[in-house]
Image (cartoon, rainbow, N blue to C red):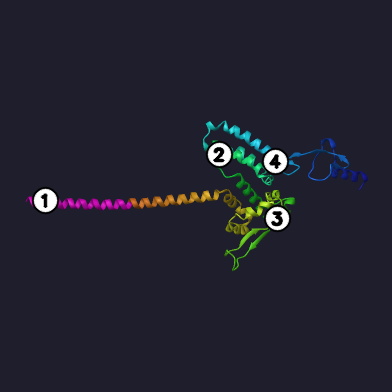
């Protein structure tokens, strides 16, 4: 290999630092890079996310809430021309989609920052006359979908190092359940972690996992975890209960129709018998009256 080819290869694989166009967001460390000072900033926008140096995600949620309020204001001005169903569709399509962009990334934000998003949805429900599932439940559903992808091996790059570890408990004589249960192991002890970590994806994974029914988890362990994603997400957001309630109502309505039909048929039979009896009695009375006159 010639020296020119070697130098060209080194230039291609060596990043060039331009101090005038370079910004530094310090989480920890020094302010020098290749012996050149870099301008220090407190927040940075990267691929749609606003990162701050304290990992609070406060600027990110301020930007998301401001964007959501502006979109909600446009829908509010159209409320007189749309009914409740159309307002719900427009809210889900234009407002909620922007509120949920990258919701797993800022999952560790403080509840006071998350409350800004909940207020926007509450305002939409108030003037729209509809009710949708909570944003916190939908974040849990997104978390479960992410965990199932990792368990099926669909993670990319460094995400494969965060594949959850499952722990199966088999039934014993002293156990409360007579079937095996699947749990998610915590990599860290909750007594040694911060509140911000407990609110993150890894901190909430085991808590959300414990809410899922064991029969569905056992089915996912056999058929593949992503095959039960929709069922688990419906269960977490409450759609499963609504669907079950609708099914129960339909079955009750069908049973009521059948019972009413049988009642009506019984009543018609009784009326028919009574009518035939009254007709026969009228004939008998007429014959007896004629005999008395004779």
Q: CA distance from mark 4 to mark 3?
A: 26 Å
Mark closer to the chain start, 2 or 3 = 2
Q: Nearer the viewer, residue 226 or 21?
A: 21
Sort mark 4 into few (<14), some (14-19) or many (20+) by Cα contacts within 10 Å: some
Mark closer to the chain start, 3 or 1 = 3
- Residue ID at (24%, 52%): 274
Q: CA distance from mark 3 to mark 1?
A: 102 Å
- Residue ID at (66%, 61%): 167
Tell me where the magenta segment starts and ends, as one range: 265-294
Mark 4 sits on what residue? 58
* Callout in the foreground (2, 1): 2
Mark closer to the chain start, 4 or 3 = 4
Q: Are marks 2 and 3 in contact (CB under 8 Å)?
A: no
Q: Where does residue 62 sit, x and y in percent of width and height?
A: 68, 38
Q: Secondary structure at mark 4?
A: helix
Q: Secondary structure at mark 2?
A: helix
Mark 3 sits on what residue? 191
Q: CA distance from mark 1 to mark 4?
A: 101 Å
Q: Nearer the viewer, residue 221 or 114?
A: 114
Mark 1 sits on what residue? 289
**Vertical arrangement, residue 80 with respect to residue 99, above or below:** above
Q: Is residue 191 left or right of residue 16?
A: left
Mark 2 sits on what residue? 125
Q: Where does residue 95 sit, x and y in percent of width and height?
A: 61, 38
Q: Are marks 4 and 3 in contact (CB under 8 Å)?
A: no
* Callout in the foreground (2, 4): 4
Sort mark 1 into few (<14), some (14-19) or many (20+) by Cα contacts within 10 Å: few
Q: CA distance from mark 2 to mark 1?
A: 78 Å
Q: Are marks 3 and 1 in contact (CB under 8 Å)?
A: no
Q: Where does residue 97 sit, x and y in percent of width and height?
A: 63, 40
Asked whether residue 270 appears in the rendered view, the answer is yes
């Amino acid at each position: 290999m010639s020296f020119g080819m070697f130098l060209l290869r080194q230039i291609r694989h060596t990043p060039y630092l331009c101090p005038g166009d370079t910004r530094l967001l310090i989480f920890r460390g020094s302010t020098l890079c290749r012996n050149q000072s870099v301008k220090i900033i407190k927040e940075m926008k990267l691929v749609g996310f606003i990162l701050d140096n304290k990992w609070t995600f406060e600027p990110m949620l301020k930007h998301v809430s401001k964007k959501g309020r502006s979109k909600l204001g446009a829908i509010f001005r159209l409320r007189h021309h749309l009914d409740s169903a159309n307002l719900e569709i427009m809210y889900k399509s234009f407002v909620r989609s922007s509120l949920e962009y990258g919701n797993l990334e800022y999952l560790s934000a403080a509840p006071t920052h998350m409350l800004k998003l909940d207020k926007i949805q509450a305002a939409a429900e108030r003037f729209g006359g509809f009710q949708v599932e909570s944003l916190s439940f939908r974040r849990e559903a997104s978390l479960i979908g992410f965990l199932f992808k990792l368990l099926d091996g669909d993670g990319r790059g460094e995400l494969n190092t965060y594949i959850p570890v499952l722990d199966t408990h088999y039934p014993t004589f002293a156990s409360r359940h007579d079937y095996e249960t699947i749990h998610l192991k915590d990599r860290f002890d909750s007594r040694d972690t911060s509140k911000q970590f407990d609110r993150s994806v890894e901190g909430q994974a085991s808590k959300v996992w414990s809410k899922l029914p064991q029969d569905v988890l056992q089915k996912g362990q056999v058929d593949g975890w992503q095959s039960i994603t929709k069922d688990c997400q419906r269960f977490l957001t409450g759609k499963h209960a609504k669907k079950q309630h609708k099914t129960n109502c339909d079955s009750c309505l069908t049973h009521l129709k059948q019972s009413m039909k049988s009642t009506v048929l019984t009543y018609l039979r009784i009326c028919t018998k009574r009518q035939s009896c009254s007709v026969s009695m009228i004939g008998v009375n007429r014959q007896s009256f004629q005999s008395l006159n004779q």
